[in-house]
Amino acid sequence: MMTWFFPFAFLVGAILVFMGLGLPVAFAFFVTNILGMYLFFGGTTGVIQMVANFSDAVSTYALAPLPMFLVMGSLYFRSGLGERVIYALDLAIGNLKGRLSYVVLAAGAVFAALSGSSLANAGMMGSLMAPEMLKRNYKPHMAFGPILGAGSLAVVIPPSSLGVLLGSLAQIDVGALLIAGVVPGLVLFVMYCALIFVQTTIDPEAAPQYEVVQTSGMVKLKAVLFNIIPMSVLVFMVVGTIILGIATPTESAALGCAGVAALLIVYRKFSWAVVWKSLDDAVKVTGMTFLIISASTTFSQVFAFSGASNGFIQFITGFDMGPYGILLMMIVVILVLGMFMDQVSMMLITLPLFMPIAAQYGFENVWFGLLLLLAYEVGFTTPPFGMLLFVMLGVAPKGTSLKTMALAAAPYIGLTLFTILLIVIFPQLALFLPSLIQR
């Protein structure tokens, strides 16, 4: 046991210590890699190998959609097109109980299919909708909960930037993994809507109805035609073309960027300042992502070469837990880590451990990848360090506590965990659409 336990404890422990000291994720991995290379690869030869890994790690074709999806989402948010969608949905939904909560969810689902970023999604919806909902005397769980739920939809509804990263790191077909999230994403959306219905039925004062200016059916139709239909076409260009096998994820990302640019021109929102800021956003995120991927590739090699990976797999498979017991254990590990780490850090630490175990038990790659993606999503909204909670605290009224935000997120977390269970019981929820592409 000691032959693998020392390198395992050293590598994982070093990562946690360096991140605990406040070192950025990528650099924490780089420092650990250098130390590991010296210990297990034989000095400077290992460090040279690490440098040689850089170009191979980031020249993967599967990563090509990432910067374009980021540009597309940034153009969409920075241009103000999202506000037009919210306006149209607000008119179309009418005077339902909890109408603004439904507006948030519907707009969040649309934005998820255009941005791929949970943080951008929650940030926009929080700044635009949370003040209005609180002004209308919505209780905190009705104001913040739907925004947190809508934000997390961007993790599974394509184009998910976290999905592209996971697929690249775990060597899973990125297109299949993105499309696998469509049905579970829609299931989550329906369950979130049902949750709002139940909450407003039990406690009507949680989302008080207020007088809405009556508009004619023609005005509503015009708002939908001019603001929602173009976005639907854009969603089809990104998601539908992959499902139908017309385009690869890279091609669909390029189509999406072209589509957003065309809409900016049509709506007279185009400006070089917006384009420049969007490119700047994408370059910053892509640069850090590529650094992380380079570090992760080397970390996986050190992990395997030192014997830690093989030893850990043999240790885990030695327990008579069965495949579903092992799967449950992996999900629980991610949920616990999600309380203290961001998603990328969790991914980098767990994927080198979990993917070989999944292969050992014969788990289908896309199915398993989606389960991990949903588990990582829960980490976005779990205290004390859930990123979406802090995004929402940034736009919430002064004095709003983390406890208030966590309680608002709790039922949405529960529904996400229930969705994981549904996918385990009914794998075709995840695999049906990818199977159409592969025919």
Image (cartoon, rainbow, N blue to C red):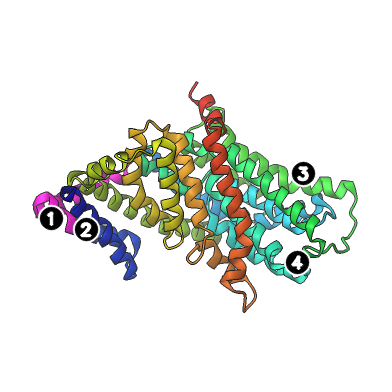
The alpha-carbon separation of the residues under discs 1 and 2 comes to 10 Å
First reached walking from the N terminus: tag 1 or tag 3: 1
Q: Position of residue 114 (x, y in %)?
A: 58, 47
Where residue 138 is drawn, which disc sits there?
4
Judging by the rendered image, the residue that carries numbered circle 1 is: 39
Q: Secondary structure at mark 4?
A: loop
Magenta segment, which residues? Answer: 34-60
In the rendered image, is residue 106 in sight? no
Between the residue at mark 1 and the residue at mark 4, the CA separation in whole angstroms equals 58 Å
Image side of residue 267 versus residue 327, left or right = right
Q: Which label number is shown at residue 225?
A: 3
Q: Earlier in the sequence, mark 1 or mark 2?
A: 2
Real-space Cα separation, disc 4 to disc 3, in angstroms: 30 Å
Q: Does residue 53 show up magenta in the picture?
A: yes
Sequence-wise, the earlier of marks 2 and 3 is 2
Residue type at the position of mark 4: Tyr
Say which label, 4 or 3, has the lower sequence index: 4
Q: Residue at x 27, y 56 (%)?
A: 12
**Dominant secondary structure of the magenta stretch?**
helix
Spot occupied by residue 406 in the image (x, y as percentages of width and height): 58, 64
Cα–Cα gap, marks 2 and 4 = 50 Å
Q: Name above or below for residue 273 compared with residue 366.
A: below
In the picture of the structure, the residue carrying the numbered disc 2 is 10
Q: Is residue 118 magenta?
A: no
Task: Measuring from the top left, give residue 214's x and y in whole percent.
Answer: 90, 56
Looking at the rendered structure, the secondary structure element under dot 3 is: helix
Between the residue at mark 1 and the residue at mark 3, the CA separation in whole angstroms equals 63 Å
Contact, CB < 8 Å: mark 1 with mark 2? yes
Mark closer to the chain start, 2 or 4: 2
Q: Is residue 1 left or right of residue 365?
A: left
* Circle nearer the viewer, 1 or 2: 2
